[in-house]
Image: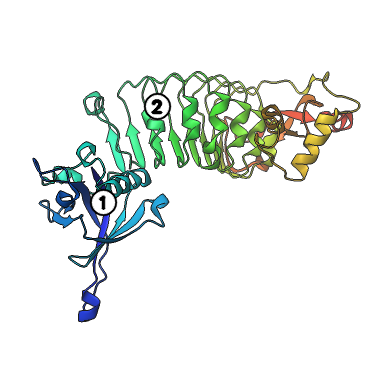
Amino acid sequence: MRINCEVQVSNRKLPSLSLNNKRGGTRSSLGIGRPPASKADVSNLFIHLCTAQNKQGTKYKVGGNIEAVFTKFVSEGKFTIRFKTPEHDLCVKADPILAKSFLHILKLGIQNKDIENLHLSSLAPVKQSQVEKPKTKLVISSKQEYPITTAFPYTLENLRVNSVELNRVENRMCKLRKLQILHLGDNLIRELPDALGQMKCLSELHLPSNALTRISPHLFSGPLCHTLHLLDLSDNKIELLPHTLGQLHTLTYLKLDKNLLTNLPVSLGKLTKLRSLSASNNKLVDLPATASHLQLDTLDVYGNPFSATLGVVDSGTLEEVPSLRELLAVSCIERGLRPTAAEIPATLVTYLGSWLKCPCGKICFESHILAHIQLDLKRVSLSITLADPFHTSVPALATLCSRKCKEKLCKR
């Protein structure tokens, strides 16, 4: 058993000699094993510590030589092994799963149980790659560089795979728990797996110049909605974006240029952190009126027709008396309640996420009227890029809560 980790060696004798005992942790390879052909007994077990400066390593006897093992923070991958001779403490920081596996084998070794069948190290010197600093960034720009038989380093925080004709996002990418930036530009990706939405650290997702035609609504319903700051879907073939786009609460930059979009989801107005939106060279006939709730620094909608005719689009969904479900849902949203699927049925959680807002500020669900009204983009963004910079008003699809709002807004 051998793990890559960070180890701080603390000599307990030094303080009594008035010597400095404060040394930072060092990237190390920590093994537990026995010499080849030796008897499978605890008396032949050693902990083997190797570093870049000492690849041969230092061996610490296990049998009768471990004073204590401190595991209070093992859930964070931290533990300390205290030896009697020499008077050293090994303060270890590793992947939590590897740390627990190492301690499990150490425990069985100390108890002298089934040592012959334990997965032990041969105590041989380590390679340079085993004690190098963990790789956090990987750039792949050709097919020859793409790892097929080897895994991606689990420590990656930034992965860029560009121009290699990749046709899908592999599941092993979605399992990189520390990944913050994923750039897969200029490939042949047609769809995105729902597993991508389960990544808990991803803050930037770049997918320009691919072959995407649709985005699954489930993609924006997982942990990704709390971490994503930048989403680049430019230069694809996307015709429709899901309503769940509005669940990306931390989204700051959204790039949708050069697609086949005819409209944007009405949930766009829920992206309160959004500061930059570019959707140039699409087929947009309107914008959602909820965009009036945004406070953008830059807005680029150049090269869109904006050809929608002003007036009522659909007046058949307005109820004189809203349903009890809608009344309760409105109350939940207004009070800031966000129940989860553990508290209420999952279908109701989805329903609560589909709320819309009338320009008057009232929340509504299925009881509403759809109408095209004028939207002055000067109210939306400080900087605007349009085909005609002197005409900044475009048709906007509004969700109206009542006939009174319809009469008021359609007369403008």
Say whether residue 392 is left or right of residue 112: right
Residue 131 image point, x, y percent: 19, 48
Q: Nearer the viewer, residue 236 or 134?
A: 134
Q: Amino acid at mark 2?
A: Asn
Q: What residue is disc 2 on? A: 171
Residue 260 image point, x, y percent: 54, 19
> Which quadrant would the N terminus be assigned to in this image?
top left
Residue 410 image point, x, y percent: 82, 28
Q: Going 63% across and 43% down the picture, which residue do you hit? A: 272
Residue 387 image point, x, y percent: 57, 29
Q: Secondary structure at mark 2?
A: helix
For the image, the number of numbered tags is 2
Q: What residue is disc 1 on? A: 110
Choose the circle earlier in sequence order: 1 or 2.
Answer: 1
Say whether residue 96 is left or right of residue 350: left
Q: Going 28% across and 36% down the picture, which residue do you hit? A: 139
Q: Are marks 1 and 2 in contact (CB under 8 Å)?
A: no
- 10 Å neighbourhood of mark 2: few (<14), some, or many (≥20)? few
Q: Mark 1, mark 2: which one is toward the viewer?
A: 1
Q: Residue furthest right?
A: 320
> Which quadrant would the C terminus be assigned to in this image?
top right
Q: Nearer the viewer, residue 263 or 10?
A: 10
Identify the image quadrant of residue 246: top right
Q: In the rendered image, is residue 361 in sight?
A: no
Q: Amino acid at mark 1?
A: Ile
- Decide: is 15 above or below 283: below
